[in-house]
Image: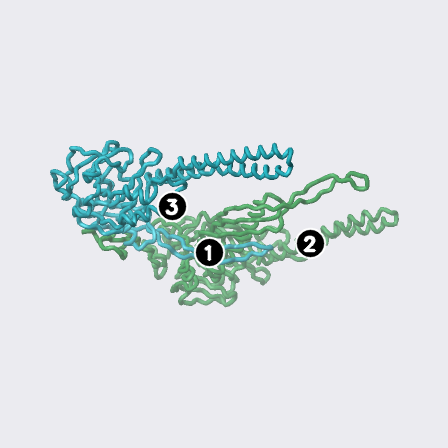
C-alpha cells in the first residue's frame, strides 16, 4: 500500500475545505463556494466539518473525457423522450447547476502464484439435420452447427495482475458500473486535474477493500486462463492461489453531478465523465401532466354542455341535432384524451424508478 | 517460479499467456488398444491365452491362469458428427493385421494371431486364404463380450434342429455340425435427441340422427379438425449392422442384444476370437439409422395426436446431439451339412438364442396346404348339391370364405417355410 499521512486538505495540493453531507455522512473536499449545495445522495447538503483528511494519497486520476458541452448534449438526448418534461430538466438549466465530482476507487496490483483447474470449452462444427415429413415423404436438410466440447485443463500460474478494483466508499455501487466502462488511460494525480471540483473522500480501508479486490483479480485471472488455453469458453474455474507483492492505488473517476428539483423533491442525475453515459432519474412532471389533463377535462365539459344545449334546441330546430352529436363526440374524445398525460407520466416515472433500482442492484 | 512438471496422466500443452502453464490430459495411446505381437501369452507358462466367457477374463488354455482384459476401468466414448470424425471414419487409419479371406463366400475376417482356421464359419468352405496386410478400419469403441461358451452350444443347437414339424425328422441326428466359430460382428450404434413438431388433421366419428323418407336414421360421419403438437424424443442405441457379408435375417433371428452390458473396447476381449470387419461405412450406416429414427418419430407423432384417424400428417424433426459408437457384438456361427447341402446357424453370443437355416420337407408343406383347402372344397361340393333343394347358396358362400382363409393360410405357411430354409 502506498499511502502517506496528510495533515490537512492542502496536503493534496487543494485549497478545498473538508465537508460532509448532513444526510448520508459522505465526506467531501468541496470548493468553498459550494458549501451548502446538495450532496450527490440528493437527500442533504454538504457542510464544512472539522474531520481529518484520510491518511491516504491519491495516485491516479482518469482524465475527464466529457467536457461540459458534451455532457449538455448527452443530457439533451437523454431528456428528449421525457414526457411532460419539467423546466428543471432543460439541459441548459441542468448544466448550469452541474459540477464535476471525482469518485474514488481502490485498485490492487498483486502477484498471484498457485494452481488452477477448469473445464475449457472448444467450439466444434458438427453436422446435423432437419427432417421434414410432407405428403408422406421425408425430406432431409443437412445443417452445420457449432457446439461446445468441454475438456479438462489444469496448470500452474505465476502472474502479476493489475487493477483489481474495489470500492473506496460505502455507496460505490451507485457508480461502479461507470468505472467498469472506463477505457481511458490513467494519469498521475495532479491538483490541476481536480481543481474547482468536488472530491469524494475514501471511507473504506484497504483491509476492508481487499476481499473485493482479490475477487476482481481472480476474475481477471480466470479470463487470462481462458486465453492461455485458447478456449472459446471456460467454466468450473478453481484457483488455489497465494498473493504477494500487493500494491494499492487510489484512483479518481470523473462524474458530472447534475442536481435538479421537481415538485419540491431533490434528484441527482449523473453523466459519466469518461463515456458520457447518463444515469439517474429523469422524471416527467406529474404537475404538468395534471394541468394538461385538467385543461382537456374542462374542454370536454364545455363541449358536453354545448352538446346538451344544442340537443335541447334541436327539439325546435332538428338540424342542430347533428351539431349536438358532433359536439358530444368531441367531448367524449377530449374526456378520453385527458387521461393520457397523467398515465404516460406515471408509466414513464415507474419505468425510470425500476431502472434506477436495477442499476443500483447491478 | 511455477513448476513445469505435469501431474501423472497429464502433459504440457501450449499456453498463449506468459506465466500460465497449461496441462492437458494425455490422450489415449491408440497402440494401447492393439493386441501384443504374437498374441496374448500366459505369464506363467507362456501358453496361448484367450478370452473366456465363463471367467469373463483372459484365460490360459494350458494352465488356467486368468488375467483381467482391461488394466483399468474406462468409459465408452461416443463421438459427435464433427467434420474431423466423419473424415476419420471415411479415410480411417490403417492397421497391420492378419485377415482371413474366403473364396467361397468372399467374407473377410480379422483373426487372432495364432488362430488355425480350416473352414469358413459362414459357408463352411475350406477355400480360405490367410493374408497379412493393411486393412482400413476404425478401431471399435465398445464390445459386448462373449457370455456363451462354444462347448455348451451343441446340445441347444441339436434341440433347435429337432424342433418343428416342417423339417426332416432325422435332422438333429444326421446333421454334420462343423466347429463353432465365435465371431464379433460389426455394429454402428447411434444416439440422438429429436425435437419434433407435427401438424395433422385428426378425425372423430360423430353420430347424428336424421329423418329420411319419414324415418329416423342414425348417420355416422367423420369430423376432421386441424391439430398440432410437439414431442421430444431420446433415440438411443439405434443399431445398424455394419456388414453386407452376413444375412441380416440371420442376425435379426438370433434376437436382440442387451446393450447395457457393453464395455469399452480392449483387445483382450478379442483374444482367441474372430472379428468381422465392417464394409458399411459410418455415413451410410447413419443414413440407415436416421431413416429408422424418422419412422419412429412419425409413429410417435401419430400416437401423440391421440386419435386413430389421422391424415395429412406433417412433421418437422430437428435432430440434435447426434453421436455414434462403433461396437463389436458376439455371435457364434456354424455351418452344417445335411444330405450334401450346407446350411448356416447363428447363436447369439450373449443370450444363446439359436437361429439359422433348416431344410424344409416340402411334401409336408403341400400336405398341410391340401389340409387347409379340404374343408372349403368339401363344403363347396355340398353347397353345389344343396342348390337343388334351394339352400345351397348360403353353403357356397361359407365355402368361399373357407377357401379364402385357406389361401391366406397357405401363403403364410409357404412364406414361413421359405424363411426357415433361408432366413435372408
Q: Nearer the viewer, residue B171 or B51?
A: B51
| Residue A194, image quadrant | top left
Q: Is residue A126 visible?
A: yes
Report which colour depicts chain B.
green
In which quadrant of the rendered image does the C terminus of chain B lie? bottom right
* Label whose residue precedes the other's in the sequence (3 or 1): 3
Crowding near the residue tagged with mark 1, few <14, some 14–19, many ≥20 C-alpha atoms within 10 Å: many
Q: Position of residue B31 (x, y in %)?
A: 34, 59
Crowding near the residue tagged with mark 2, few <14, some 14–19, many ≥20 C-alpha atoms within 10 Å: many
Which-is-in-front pick, marks 3 and 1?
Answer: 3
- Residue at image mark 3: A80
- Residue at image mark 2: B410
Which-is-in-front pick, marks 2 and 3?
Answer: 3
Residue at the spot x=41%, y=50% of the render?
A: B263
Question: Share a chain, discs 1 and 2?
Answer: no
| Residue A346, image quadrant | top left
- Residue at image mark 1: A128
Q: CA distance from mark 1 to mark 2?
A: 47 Å
Q: Position of residue A322 (x, y in %)?
A: 61, 39
Callout 1: chain? A
Viewed as shown, does residue A33 lie left or right of B311? left
Q: Nearer the viewer, residue A217 or B172?
A: A217
Crowding near the residue tagged with mark 3, few <14, some 14–19, many ≥20 C-alpha atoms within 10 Å: few
Report which colour depicts chain A.
cyan
Amino acid at each position: 500500500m502506498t499511502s502517506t499521512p496528510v495533515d490537512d486538505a492542502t496536503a493534496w495540493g487543494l485549497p478545498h475545505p473538508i465537508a460532509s453531507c448532513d444526510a448520508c455522512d459522505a465526506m467531501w473536499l468541496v470548493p468553498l463556494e459550494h458549501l451548502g449545495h446538495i450532496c450527490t445522495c440528493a437527500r442533504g447538503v454538504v457542510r464544512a466539518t472539522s474531520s481529518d483528511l484520510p491518511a491516504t494519497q491519491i495516485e491516479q486520476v482518469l482524465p475527464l473525457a466529457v467536457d461540459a458541452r458534451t455532457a449538455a448534449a448527452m443530457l439533451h438526448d437523454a431528456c428528449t423522450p421525457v414526457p411532460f418534461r419539467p423546466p428543471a430538466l432543460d439541459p441548459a438549466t441542468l448544466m448550469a447547476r452541474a459540477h464535476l465530482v471525482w469518485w474514488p476507487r481502490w485498485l490492487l496490483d498483486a502477484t498471484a502464484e498457485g494452481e488452477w483447474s477448469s473445464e475449457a470449452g472448444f467450439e466444434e462444427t458438427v453436422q446435423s439435420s432437419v427432417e421434414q415429413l410432407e405428403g408422406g415423404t421425408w425430406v432431409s436438410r443437412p445443417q452445420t452447427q457449432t457446439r461446445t466440447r468441454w475438456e479438462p485443463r489444469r496448470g500452474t500460474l505465476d502472474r502479476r495482475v493489475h487493477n483489481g478494483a474495489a470500492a473506496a466508499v460505502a455507496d460505490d455501487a451507485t457508480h461502479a458500473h461507470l468505472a467498469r466502462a472506463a477505457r481511458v488511460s490513467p494519469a498521475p494525480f495532479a491538483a490541476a486535474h481536480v481543481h474547482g471540483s468536488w472530491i469524494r473522500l475514501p471511507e473504506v480501508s484497504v483491509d476492508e477493500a481487499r476481499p473485493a479486490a482479490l475477487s476482481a483479480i481472480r476474475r481477471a485471472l480466470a479470463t487470462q486462463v481462458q486465453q492461455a488455453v485458447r478456449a472459446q469458453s471456460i467454466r468450473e474455474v478453481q484457483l488455489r492461489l497465494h498473493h504477494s507483492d500487493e500494491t494499492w492505488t487510489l484512483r479518481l473517476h470523473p462524474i458530472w453531478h447534475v442536481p435538479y428539483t421537481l415538485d419540491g423533491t431533490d434528484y441527482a442525475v449523473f453523466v459519466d465523465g469518461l463515456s458520457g453515459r447518463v444515469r439517474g432519474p429523469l422524471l416527467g412532471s406529474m404537475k404538468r401532466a395534471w394541468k394538461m389533463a385538467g385543461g382537456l377535462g374542462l374542454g370536454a365539459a364545455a363541449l358536453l354542455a354545448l352538446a346538451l344545449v344544442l340537443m335541447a334546441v334541436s327539439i325546435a330546430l332538428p338540424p342542430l341535432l347533428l351539431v349536438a352529436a358532433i359536439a358530444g363526440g368531441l367531448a367524449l374524445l377530449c374526456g378520453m384524451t385527458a387521461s393520457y398525460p397523467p398515465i404516460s407520466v406515471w408509466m414513464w416515472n415507474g419505468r425510470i424508478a425500476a431502472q434506477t433500482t436495477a442499476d443500483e442492484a447491478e | 517460479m511455477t513448476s513445469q512438471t505435469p501431474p501423472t496422466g497429464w502433459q504440457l500443452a501450449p499456453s498463449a499467456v506468459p506465466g500460465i502453464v497449461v496441462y492437458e490430459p494425455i490422450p489415449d495411446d491408440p497402440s494401447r488398444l492393439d493386441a501384443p505381437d504374437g498374441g496374448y501369452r500366459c505369464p506363467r507358462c507362456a501358453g496361448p491365452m484367450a478370452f473366456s466367457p465363463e471367467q469373463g477374463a483372459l484365460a490360459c488354455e494350458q494352465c488356467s491362469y486368468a488375467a483381467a482384459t482391461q488394466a483399468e476401468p474406462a468409459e465408452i466414448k461416443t463421438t459427435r458428427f464433427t467434420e474431423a470424425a466423419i473424415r476419420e471414419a471415411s479415410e480411417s487409419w490403417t492397421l497391420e493385421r492378419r485377415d482371413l479371406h474366403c473364396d467361397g463366400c468372399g467374407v473377410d475376417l480379422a483373426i487372432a494371431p495364432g488362430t488355425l482356421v480350416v473352414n469358413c464359419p459362414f459357408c463352411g468352405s475350406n477355400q480360405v486364404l490367410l493374408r497379412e496386410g493393411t486393412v482400413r478400419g476404425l478401431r471399435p469403441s465398445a464390445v459386448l463380450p462373449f457370455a456363451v461358451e462354444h462347448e455348451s452350444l451343441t446340445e441347444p443347437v441339436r434341440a433347435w434342429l429337432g424342433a418343428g414339424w416342417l423339417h426332416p425328422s432325422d435332422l438333429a441326428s444326421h446333421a454334420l455340425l462343423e466347429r463353432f466359430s465365435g465371431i464379433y460382428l460389426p455394429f454402428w450404434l447411434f444416439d440422438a435427441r429429436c425435437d419434433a413438431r407435427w401438424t395433422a388433421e385428426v378425425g372423430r366419428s360423430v353420430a347424428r340422427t336424421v329423418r329420411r323418407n319419414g324415418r329416423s336414421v342414425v348417420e355416422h360421419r367423420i369430423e376432421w379438425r386441424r391439430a398440432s403438437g410437439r414431442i421430444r424424443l431420446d433415440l438411443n442405441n439405434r443399431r445398424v449392422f455394419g456388414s453386407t457379408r452376413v444375412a441380416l435375417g440371420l442376425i435379426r433371428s438370433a434376437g436382440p442384444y442387451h446393450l447395457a452390458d457393453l464395455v469399452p473396447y480392449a483387445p483382450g476381449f478379442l483374444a482367441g476370437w474372430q472379428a468381422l470387419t465392417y464394409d458399411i461405412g459410418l455415413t451410410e450406416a447413419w443414413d440407415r439409422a436416421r431413416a429408422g429414427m424418422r419412422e419412429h418419430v412419425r409413429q410417435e407423432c401419430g400416437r401423440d395426436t391421440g386419435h386413430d384417424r389421422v391424415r395429412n400428417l406433417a412433421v418437422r424433426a430437428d435432430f440434435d446431439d447426434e453421436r455414434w459408437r462403433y461396437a463389436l457384438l458376439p455371435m457364434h456361427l456354424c455351418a452344417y451339412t445335411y444330405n450334401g447341402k450346407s446350411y448356416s446357424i447363428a447363436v447369439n453370443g450373449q443370450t444363446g438364442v439359436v437361429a439359422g437355416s433348416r431344410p424344409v420337407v416340402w411334401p409336408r408343406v403341400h400336405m398341410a396346404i391340401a389340409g387347409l383347402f379340404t374343408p372349403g372344397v368339401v363344403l363347396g361340393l355340398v353347397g353345389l348339391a344343396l342348390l337343388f333343394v334351394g339352400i345351397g347358396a348360403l353353403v357356397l358362400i361359407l365355402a368361399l370364405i373357407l377357401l379364402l382363409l385357406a389361401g391366406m393360410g397357405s401363403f403364410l405357411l409357404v412364406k414361413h417355410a421359405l424363411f426357415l430354409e433361408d432366413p435372408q
